[in-house]
Image (cartoon, helix red, strand yellow):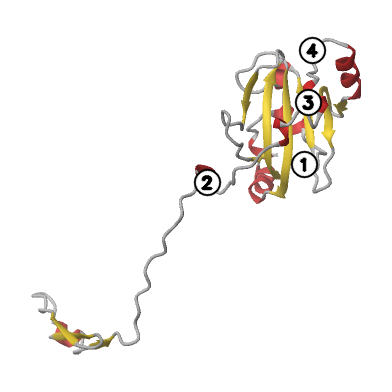
């Protein structure tokens, strides 16, 4: 059997010998495949991208790194002084867990975190009671990369999950958590500073809620 491939402007032929175990002459007739009108488009050249863009989360500067714009961020709740005492008085206790307190440094105007069936996109820092920054999405002098978190996965702990409830997109909140709700390897009380960028429903969290009530 002979199969001919025709290209413009000339024709080239490729001979295919039948396999010993198969009678190709009975299966395939002699074929002529025309490539007329076929054009080759070269692959585009891609510009270099940052690691953050490669992960689908563009690099972004956080307002958590601008304490001069938000003086209350400078007044750490475990410090002493009248100004700090006044800040503590402003803090709101979480209804079902009064040991968890929060203060809205700046109130947002977007969608609200209303339950644990949400996924959020945030910038955050976590400090121990001595104001040592232990965790967060900061990048050693580089711009932060927003963190995506599904609240039902309990990645940042129960203190964070309860303290972020009621927060709206665009807001900045400080959350004080007691030792039993502290984050990972930090002993004692801790403080979350959170900038909420986006709130979305999470289908996986909704399903998880159904099966793991």
Disc 4, SS = loop
Q: CA distance from mark 2 to mark 3?
A: 30 Å
| 2 or 3: mark nearer the eye | 3
SS at circle 3:
helix
Mark number for residue 55? 2
Residue 83, relative to residue 113: is it above or below? above
**Distance from Cα at disc 1 to Cα at disc 3:** 26 Å
Q: Which mark is residue 73?
A: 3
Q: Residue furthest top?
A: 80
Q: Is 114 in front, or is 58?
A: 58
Q: Position of residue 172 (x, y in %)?
A: 78, 35
Q: CA distance from mark 4 to mark 3?
A: 12 Å
User: Measured along the vertical axis of the image, is residue 33 above or below residue 121?
Assistant: below
Residue at mark 4 to residue at mark 2: CA–CA distance = 38 Å
- Label 3 crowd bin: few (<14), some (14–19), many (20+), radius 10 Å: some
Disc 1 marks which residue?
Answer: 115
Distance between the Cα atoms at labels 4 and 1?
A: 32 Å
Q: Earlier in the sequence, mark 4 or mark 3?
A: 3
Classify 10 Å Cα crowding around label 4: few (below 14), some (14-19), many (20 and above). Answer: few
Residue at the spot x=70%, y=39% of the render? Answer: 213
Location of mark 4 (residue): 79
Dividing the picture into quadrants, the one containing residue 61 is top right
**Mark 2 or 1: the one toward you:** 2
- Residue at 63% across / 48% down in the picture? 204
Q: Quadrant of residue 116?
A: top right
> What is the C-alpha distance between the residues marked 2 and 1?
27 Å
Work out whether residue 213 or residue 178 is closer to the camera in this orientation and state it: 178
Percent position of residue 158, x then y: 71, 29
Quarter holding the N terminus? bottom left
């Amino acid at each position: 059997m002979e199969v001919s491939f025709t290209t413009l402007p000339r024709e080239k032929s490729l001979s295919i010998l039948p396999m010993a175990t198969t009678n190709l002459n009975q299966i395939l007739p002699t074929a002529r495949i025309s490539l007329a009108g076929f054009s080759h488009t070269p692959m585009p050249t891609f510009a270099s991208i940052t690691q953050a863009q490669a992960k689908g989360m563009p690099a972004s500067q956080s307002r958590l790194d601008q304490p001069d714009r938000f003086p209350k961020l400078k007044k750490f709740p475990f410090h002493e002084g009248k100004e700090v005492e006044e800040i503590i008085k402003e803090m709101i206790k979480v209804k079902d867990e009064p040991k968890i307190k929060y203060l809205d440094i700046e109130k947002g105007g977007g969608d609200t975190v209303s339950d644990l069936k949400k996924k959020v996109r945030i910038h955050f820092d976590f400090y121990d009671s001595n104001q040592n920054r232990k965790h967060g999405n900061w990048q050693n002098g580089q711009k932060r990369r927003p963190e995506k978190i599904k609240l039902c996965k309990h990645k940042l702990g129960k203190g964070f999950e309860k303290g972020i409830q009621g927060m709206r997109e665009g807001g900045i909140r400080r959350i004080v958590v007691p030792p039993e709700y502290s984050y990972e390897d930090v002993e004692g009380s801790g403080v979350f500073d959170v900038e909420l960028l986006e709130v979305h429903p999470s289908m996986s969290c909704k399903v998880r809620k159904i099966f793991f009530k």
